[in-house]
Image (spheres, helix red, strand yellow):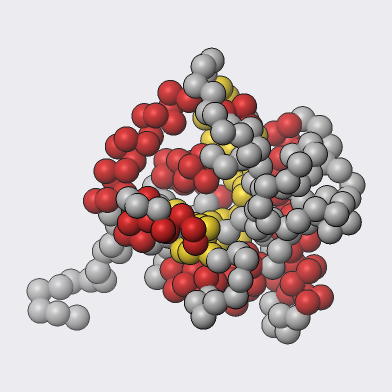
Amino acid sequence: MAPGETGARKPKSEKTPLYRVIAFFVVPLMNLLARYDIQHSEHLPASGPAVVSPNHYSEIDPIVIGLAMWKRGRTPRFLAKASLFKVPVVGWILRKTGQIPVERRQRNTSDPLAAANKLTENGLAVVIYPEGTLTRDPDLWPMRGKHGAVRMALEHDVPLIPVAHWGTQAVLPRYGKRISFFPRKDISIRFGAPVDLTPFKGRPLDHATLNAATDKLMDAIAALLSELRGEPAPAERWDPSKAGQSETGRFD
């Protein structure tokens, strides 16, 4: 400890000056678009590392989840499409705010999960959409999940927070091109209790373990969404491969 210090250093604020500038413009605009009912945000740790895993059915979803986390005092980091980092201004903002590029169509030398791992080690909250893309389910229920979120949570022993939201499709439909500003919409966001990954700790992170843990995460997200929608989730999650659909990109 340096001379004159009497205790541990206060953690550095996640809300950097650039993030505060962005929020200054984005938050009022999002408040014009919709009213937000943010439920059980206490499940998201107020500080420290966490993996946040929401459902995904509209391209505006990340902004809605980011807004909910911001109101909780957290600054989200996302895994974002690598192509966005090549867009002037947008790419600069993504890099400066610590977002993580993901190249979907080809393997490269960078590992996006390795970059996300570094963020969890620094005590930040990382948003990983377990579906990997917008759901293909015709009724916008969560589809089959991928392993990235549970793998990170298990490898680093950090909370895995399921989240569901409903209403963003009224602002911007799945793969829609126009945002609906009027009338003002209602969006509900519900945070769930951390997924209990105790049964999987200490086990090899093989395909069977990751599948079982991911199923548990997707069950939690679907249950939260069912509560928001007031209707039961499908008994079986949508599987794009069985429906002859591509895993990435737009679809009919």
Taking the spot 50% from the left edge, 77% from the top edge, the residue there is 110
Residue 3 sits in quarter: bottom left
Q: Position of residue 15 (x, y in %)?
A: 31, 52
Taking the spot 24% from the left edge, 51% from the top edge, the residue there is 17
| Residue 116 visible within the image | yes
Depicted 12 relative to depicted 136: above or below: below
Taking the spot 43% from the left edge, 23% from the top edge, the residue there is 32
Q: Residue furthest left?
A: 4
Quadrant that contains the C terminus: top right
Q: In the image shown, does 88 or 224 lie closer to the viewer?
A: 88
Q: Position of residue 83 (x, y in %)?
A: 49, 58
Residue 216 sits in quarter: bottom right
| Residue 193 visible within the image | no
The mark total stands at: 0
Q: In the image shown, does 252 or 30 lie closer to the viewer?
A: 252
Taking the spot 52% from the left edge, 70% from the top edge, the residue there is 112
Q: In the image shown, does 33 or 235 lie closer to the viewer?
A: 33
Determine whether, in the image, residue 167 is placed left or right of residue 116. Answer: right
Q: Position of residue 35 (x, y in %)?
A: 51, 25
Residue 188 sits in quarter: top right
Quadrant that contains the N terminus: bottom left
Determine whether, in the image, residue 148 is placed left or right of residue 23. Answer: right
Depicted 108 relative to depicted 143: above or below: below
Depicted 35 relative to depicted 239: above or below: above
Q: Position of residue 156 (x, y in %)?
A: 55, 75
Q: In the image shown, does 224 or 34 lie closer to the viewer?
A: 34
Depicted 198 relative to depicted 185: above or below: below
Determine whether, in the image, residue 49 is placed left or right of residue 202. Answer: left
